Image (cartoon, rainbow, N blue to C red):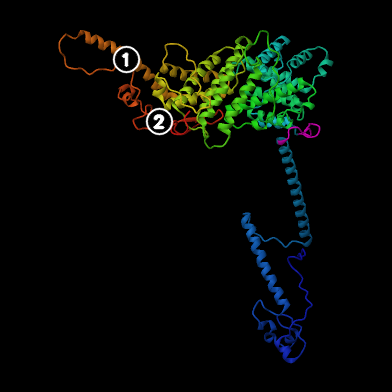
Amino acid sequence: MPRSSFSDNPLLRVSRPVSACSRCRAAKVKCDGKLPACTACEKAGRENECSSANDQFARGKERSYVAALELRIEKLEKRLKFAQNRKASVSNHINDEAAPPADRKDSLANIRAAIHRKAARSREESDVNALVSDFGFLSVNATTRDFEPSLSNMTFARLVLAAATNDKVPDPTEDSFPTRTDAAATIDYYMNNVHALFPCFPRDHVFNVLDAFYQQDERVKEKLQDSDYWLLYMVLAIGYSAQSRNKDDECYRRGLDFVARALPFADKALMPGYPTQISSLILFTQYSMLDPAHFDSWYLIGFASRAVVDLGFHQDPPQLQVPDKNAQDLRRRMFYCVYALDRTISMSRARSFSFTDDSVNVEYPSPSAPPSGAITGTQSADPALLLFQLRRVQSEWYQTLHQGDSAPLPDPASFIWQMCLEMREWHENLPEKDSLPAGIRELFELELRHSYVYCLAPSDRSPHLTDYARKLIFEHAIAYMNTIHAVARNSVNPAFYTSLDALKVYFVAMQFFTVFSAARELLLSEQRIIPPITRPGTAPPPPLPHRQMGGEDNVDRSIRCLQQVVETLGKFSERFDIASSLKDGFESISSELFSWLQVRRQMRDQQPQQQHHQHQQHQQMPPGPSPPQPQHPTHPPHPHPQVLMTHPQMQIPGMMPQPGQQPMMQYRWVGDGSGQMMPGGQPGQGGAPR
């Protein structure tokens, strides 16, 4: 039999004196106080008459120490039993058979095991906290060099890939490496179309790496670092992917192969604490914009922005600490490359910037050597510098309208007119056409019109639109669609167009749909809209964009604009999967408006025929008095909807507002390419006009 533990069966050895029973006290003999009857009473055969002194007191207030202790033990046993039953009910585990009493040694072993388990849990929690602290340190400080393969299995590159990878990159094919001539041509395409806008590394460096890579001497290749291989492979990947027009063509497959070749060098190329980390992340971000199916550009530009801030590139160093002017220019170019990419990705996805302009104190880099030919413009022909200047203006109004306080501005019209004036001055001061490549100039035109629409669109700080602002959005949206439609149908990409352009097309299309649904007759009419009056000393409203001369009226232009949106998104869907959902969403939203415009055009085309038929009937009538006939209108359709609704062909439910009916609900794009819309407030009601 196992010996009971001391906690379960305590030994009640008490040496205290107890009170004598009533018989022994009366006989004045010694009473041992034994229970239930003392020894003297047992010998006398009077066990039933032996009454303890405790019987004279209430239960719980006995004077006997033994009785009080027994009562205490009884209460504790009840509490212990209650606690055990409660624990069993909570854990849903009921033991049918009573467990045998545990040995005292087993009880001590259980206590020792519990202590060890607690210590193990403490060590585990400490390890988890240390790991979480390491990840937090990585997210805050990207300059640490403690995360290397020789020190830890977790590297900064693996953290970046784990966060930014959407789909696994397939292994490269063995025969996918091009000849030196093809590689040089691809690098030239990258330098002319991508590096011209984002010069994150010296121009000669990539060609030096290319020469060393194709050398027969292995000793020359051994001098190349992992960051050099990453640079060469990523430039080739971006160069091929930027020329791709379909996700199944040869250019896209070659670009994906070169990314797979570059990933093994990511640990050293993305190692924190070195300037090469920034340029490597910039290249990675550029490729992700061309291949959103495999990588997410939002996370990559976030890592690049953190690396820029942690290395201090967002602040110009003191002049005494700048020994080389070229090194300072390269430092500034790398920062503004990250700045420009962060702004365009955040604005396209309607998200916050990685860092604000208030934290930036970096001058523009020196312009690169201009090409041959005189430059008569006031700005340099360096496309990168022009792009950096435009991004600064865009960043200012985007932070004020979409990232600041949600309360409306006291005078939103003056602020928006001022921002439009600065963007217009930037455009007017562009260099001559011969000094700027045609493809990049066309890209700048699209960026400008997209910025106009974005800045004029309703926001929390400027929620209301005037008729003049609607007309501006209407004209700029049509001009934007005309240009991007031609770019999408071109056989070759004339500039750096990415998946973000599909989001921009959708955004501009939704703004066109919103303003047109709110003021159809106003925008279809050819009447002149007077610009709003501004306060003295403030910027004037921007003029309406130049309209191409032609026979199209606003009905035909609107129909063509809707068709171009669908065709452009359809063309982009051949390259980017995200454009397919955007195209389907816009077709579903605009189908009713498109039908209404077709009926409106049919009415316009039938009106001259009706007038000609009435004129012939009038000539065939015999002379003489005749009863008065109702006169048909000889002017264009009445601009008021209640008159148009009387025509039988115009009774399209839900498209034309009835008298006293509110205009159509305004839709504003708030997603990041998922095709989601949310209803906004009714435009043009109250507020400061603009």
Q: Is residue 534 above or below residue 243?
A: below
Q: Quadrant of the N terminus?
A: bottom right
Residue that mark 2 sits on:
663
- The answer to if 196 sits in the magenta stretch is no
SS category of the residue bearing label 1 = helix
Identify the amino acid type marked 2.
Pro
Q: CA distance from mark 2 to mark 1?
A: 27 Å
Q: Is residue 554 visible?
A: yes
| Residues rendered magenta in the picture | 140-153
The reply to whether the magenta stretch includes residue 150 is yes
Rendering quarter of residue 648:
top left
Q: Residue 494: in sight, yes or no?
A: no
The residue located at (75%, 32%) in the rendering is 143
Q: Quadrant of residue 466?
A: top left
For badge 1, the amino acid type reads Gln
Question: Is the residue marked by circle 2 packed among few (<14), some (14-19), or many (20+) residues within 10 Å?
Answer: some
Residue under the image location 72 percent in, 10 percent down: 179
| Residue at the extreme front | 536
Q: Position of residue 89 (x, y in %)?
A: 61, 57
Residue 423 shown left or right of residue 134 in the figure:
left
- First in residue order: circle 2 vs circle 1: 1
Which residue is under mark 1? Answer: 607
Position of residue 93 measured from the top left corner of the image (x, y, whole percent): 63, 55
